[in-house]
Structures are given as structure tokens and as C-alpha cells.
Amino acid sequence: MSAAGGAHSGPAFLPWHREFVKRVEFALRQVDPSVNLPYWDSTLDSGLPRAADTILFSEYLMGGSSAQGLVNSGPFVNWQTLSGRAQIQRAVGAQGAPLSQNDIDFVMRQTQIDQVLSFTAPQQGCPYRTDFNCLEYTHGNVHIFVGGDMFDTATSSNDPSFFLHHSFIDFVWEQWRLAKQSRADREIAYPPDNQLCASPQHFGASPMQPFSPMRNIDGLSNKYTDNLYSFAPKPTCTAGGDCGSKFLFCDTSSGAARCVSRIKPGSSCAQFRVNPCFAGSTAPPPTVAPVTPAPSTPNPIQSQESCFNENQCCATWAASGECQRNTAYMNEWCKASCGVCKPKYRLADGMYINRSSFYHFSSFSPPTFFFQIAPIVTLNALDGREVASAQRTPFG
């Protein structure tokens, strides 16, 4: 945890990831100054009867996967991962779900900073409530939805979809900041320091490890969107119109017109008034050249033990009745404490197994960040133009 600072389990989650994604984007621009990270608005996929049918995870965009979960088409075939494997792993749609519009609406209704920069791993005695609809929790459902590398904290950044997903989480946070805070408050409003609510690594003045000398509160700076990047609006449509992308269609089957991801070839296109299939066909996808499998290596996701808690607070939550009040979340993240399965180990109070918890960040260490970025105040132009004019746009 010390190497990653407040990456998860508390108020620093959003500012930490804002800085991380910014640094990755700038590293890409050192290779190609025209590159901008798009955001993946997964609410566009939640409008499909089966979100796993989205065109996003096909050879046309982020790539399709084999029956074994290895990415075998698209631009990321044979993409060597940070953990040394020759292919990215996914299990799209096996578990989890994309973000829904209800998830976004919940965030936008919040009025207090501790409801957005949330205490997501509080201990008994913390005076702030934990809401299971907060952005750190719901963002994890998308990690589960993509599966494979994205499912496991230790490998999630192996998959380029990680950065697109977190760009959208950053977008949602910025929309809330603009709607609910004054310009001055955006830079100073931070939840109070309380060790019953979050570890000291989440305190406002604590170092934003490994991004020294930054502090967590520095991630609230207006300079990010003043000087470095801006967001294009979410795609919208009116009945009979389009969404401005060949990968989206305007759906009116549920009432108000909304943009939805097109369906990848080979999947069912029923239940819509217009043909939502990409290329207008349900024909099987094009033949893809076979990919030579990588040398056999142990799957880092698998384990002989399959019954885990995925949060250090599961035992406390279960004891307070959350298995019954928040069944969907608890059955996914706290299987052992809620009795969904029976662990082989002794389930001691407060004990959890660090298999793939999104709230116990242990993988990123300083050597992972192989580039250094100048102080943020100097980064107002990269390739002779104002960076703020280059928007982060919706993916697709």
C-alpha cells in the first residue's frame, strides 16, 4: 500500500487516478504528440440487452477474445503485458456490468464532498456513512465486467481499456465538480482526516505516492482542465438522427432517444426498432488469422482457493447486516463473509484474502512509472499548440 499511496479505499481514489492517467497520456505524447486518450462511456453499452455484445470488444476497436479469454483480434493482439505475458486476458460479460445512467445520476445528485471523494473502507466508529453507489464502488463493476486482467488489481493496467475507463471516471468527477462546486472550492474541498474512516495515505496533505512531491489535495487542481485537457460532451441524439459515430446508433425502443453501442457481428440484433448491428448485419465476424498462443504460464487470476472476501471490511459489513441490505454488492465482493461459498482457510474477523481486491492496491511501485513529467504548471503546451484545445473524446 505504501508504494501506491491512496490509489484505492478512500478519498484519494479520484485525484490519484487523475494524475496517473494524465502521466500515461503524456508518456504517449512523447512518442506521438497528436495522441489524446479517449474516454469509454460504458453507459452506452448498458443499453444493450447483452452488454458483452458491444462493438467495443471486437476486432474493430479494443479487440475480441478467444474461448480461453486471450485477446486474439484488433490492435492489441500479442500485446506484451507489464507482467510479461504475451497476450491480454479478458472475460467480457462473465460477471459485473457496465456503468448505468442511474450510477451517473446518483453521483450528480450528491452535494457533499465526502459523498464523492468517499470513505470506502471505513472502520467502526467512522462518522461518515458508506454508500454502495459511490463512484469508487460502481467503477469496480466495470473492471469485473471486462474481466481477466482488468478483474485483478495487480494486472488491471495490462489492458488498455483500463485507461479509457478511468478517463470516463475522471469525466464524471469533473462534471460533478463543475455542477456542484465553485471554482475555488474545487481546489480546497477535501474530506477531513480521520483514521477511523481512511488510512493516513488518504489524508489531503499526504504524499500522492509514487508521484512525489505531489500531495493528494494537489489532484484537485483546476490546472488539469485549465491547461492540460478538456472533455468532449457525451454523445446524444434525437429520434431519427445519429450519434456522430459509426459505432453507435440512436435507440428509441425504450422511449427517449439515446445513443447506444452497436452490436458486434455474430450477435443478436433483436429488440430494437432500428438495426443496431455494426455493418447492418448479423453475419459471422470476419475470419481472423490464428494467433500463436503464448508459452504456457500460470494464470495469475486462478488459485486453488476460490472463496474470498475482496475487501478488508467484509467481516464488519456482514456483521452489521449488509449481506441482506446490499445483497448484489456483498455477494460479489464479500462471498466468504456472506456465506456464498465456504473458504478452506479460517475466516477470522477482519481477515480478507488479497487475490484481486480493487480496494487493496499493491501492484504499482515506483519502477512501474518509467517516465518523469515536469511540474504541472509548465505543461500548457506539448507540440506547439495549446493542449487544452485537444479534447478527450468518447471512444468510438
Image (spheres, grey):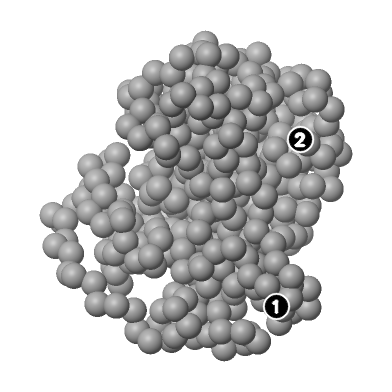
Identity, as a three-letter code, of the amino acid under mark 1: Gly
Along the line of sight, which residue is nearer the eye, 84 or 25? 25
Is 168 on the left-hand or right-hand side of 149?
A: right
Identity, as a three-letter code, of the amino acid under mark 2: Arg
What residue is drawn where x is 58% and y is 34%?
A: 389
Q: Are marks 2 and 1 in contact (CB under 8 Å)?
A: no
Give the structural element (helix, strand or loop) at label 1: loop
In the picture shown, does residue 98 fall above or below 51? Answer: above
- Name the residue that disc number 2 marks: 177
> Where is residue 396 drawn, in percent x and y?
50, 59
Labels 2, 1: front one: 1
Bin the neighbour count of mark 1 within 10 Å (Cα to Cα): few under 14, some 14-19, many 20 and up. Answer: few
Is 134 on the left-hand or right-hand side of 350?
A: right
Instruction: State the mark number for residue 240.
Output: 1
Is 241 on the left-hand or right-hand side of 65?
A: right
Is 345 on the left-hand or right-hand side of 122?
A: left
